[in-house]
Amino acid sequence: MRELVRRLATGRWDVTAGGQLRQLWLESGEVRAVVSDAEDEKLGKWLVAQGLLDSAQMALALLRQPDGVRFGAFLVQQGLLDGEVLEHSLEALATDIVARLLTLPGEHAFAAGDPLPDDAATIEMTTASVVVAAVRRIEDVGDLEPFLPAERYACGTEDARLQYQRVQLVPEEAFLFSRVDGSATVSQLRRVVPLPREAMTRCLAALVLSGMVELRATPGPRPAVVETAPLLPLKREPEKNEASVQFTPDQQHEYREVVRLAGECRLRDYYRRLGLTHGATLNQVHERFREFVQVYHPDRASEPHLHSLRRELAEINGAIQEAYETLINPEKRARYTEGMRTNPMQTAEEQVQDDRRQRARRELARANVQRAQALIRAGDFGAAVQLLDEAVRAEPNAESLLLLARLEQRNPMWTNRVLDHLRMSVTLDPEYTDAWLELAAFWGKRSQKERQRQCLEKILAYDPVNGEVMRLLDSLRAKK
């Protein structure tokens, strides 16, 4: 799994163990969906075991489930389960399945490029977070001992993509992580770190299996610093950066910059990709690469304003990795630089081509919106969503984002996508009444009355005589 993260792999990973098939879909190295053939790992049985659904409800729902509608989505449509509870239940179930995979011997096969189904019930955890949470759920820590050879040195990974994964550590894991300095073996750490043996084994296995720590035959570097936080409960509170009903100007700028760079990065020469001159030292190449990997790490897709740009972040990351692997190697760099000298007009031509491609991308986005509107009239909503999604990536505008959000609301598993696109719509056009009303309705359905009120008051700030909005506000006040 660490290797798939490092390669930013996209595809389906099949694991056959004990006669049962478990499948993980990855996009740009991130686990996006986990399913299992095992009866007790199927969603319905798991929800019953967790007390979130009774067995009679599950049986009746299975009988009524229409063809082509996923079971979780059907439960939400029938009012048997809250959409947010389902979202976090899927994350917990995925974690349980991965916990079993970590210790079960089996056969593995990776189908590179196999796309995630459009209607898949996706999770929003980073791969490192899934692995760390899975280790916490393993009951017998003895199953983790084979991953921790006593005489190997615990060191920080030197792979920048693994270094800058986003993961939340519980206090014991964070404490152990702070004691890893690359100079102590596993057995030495066990002696000097004041943790019970079981906790020590579990914490170190979590750090090693997630790729945050490597075990080597010789001493190595200290790990990079990572974010730490308490273990999250199943029902999470909204993140602080979701409190605002709009994205900030900085978030909007970063969204546009990621879209722009994803379209241009591969077209630039290796020096321009890293923002360096031909005279840059090897140390400068290394430091700029580490800086860029952190800024454009695919794990940043967990941030609300970048949720829809996982592929773009991976594209940028892959382009800077390609440049780094050449420029950090003196022989490869010399050959590459000499090749550039034989074509001195290359850079100027690249800039002209960049402009042409930008125009072509904008024209394609507008054509996609027109085709999507025709598909909506014909009732083909799935294809319309795909076209609109591509359009707003290339040229985000308020109207297309609102149209996309309205279509996405047909799928109860796309709550985060709907919210992100509505927020981006009102950010791009702060006086777009239809988008503000849609966003207000979004919060109203989730009993978030304060946020609903904020959205309605945004409209009155530029349209103080809007009768519909005043009636909605009066209705909200009357319900208090």
Image: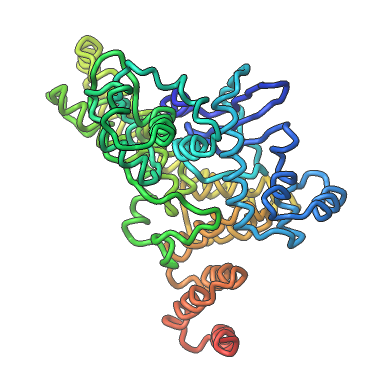
Q: Residue visible at 64% across and 56% down?
A: 407
- Decide if residue 389 is on the left or right side of residue 158: right
The foreground one among 93 and 268 is: 93
Residue 270 drawn at (x, y percent): 27, 25
Q: Is residue 353 above or below residue 121?
A: above
Identify the image's colour scheme: rainbow, by chain, secondary structure or one colour: rainbow
Q: Quadrant of residue 260?
A: top left
- Residue 194 visible in the snapshot: yes
- Decide if residue 346 is on the left or right side of residue 378: left
Q: How many marks?
A: 0
The foreground one among 400 and 405 is: 405
Q: Residue visible at 55% across and 53% down?
A: 234
- Decide if residue 145 is on the left or right side of residue 281: right
Q: Residue visible at 68% across and 33% down?
A: 36
- Decide if residue 76 is on the left or right side of residue 268: right
- Residue 342 visible in the snapshot: no
The foreground one among 252 and 105 is: 105
Residue 326 drawn at (x, y percent): 28, 18
Q: Is residue 422 above or below residue 231?
A: below
Residue 321 drawn at (x, y percent): 33, 26
Residue 142 drawn at (x, y percent): 50, 26
Q: Which quarter of the image is occupied by the C terminus?
A: bottom right
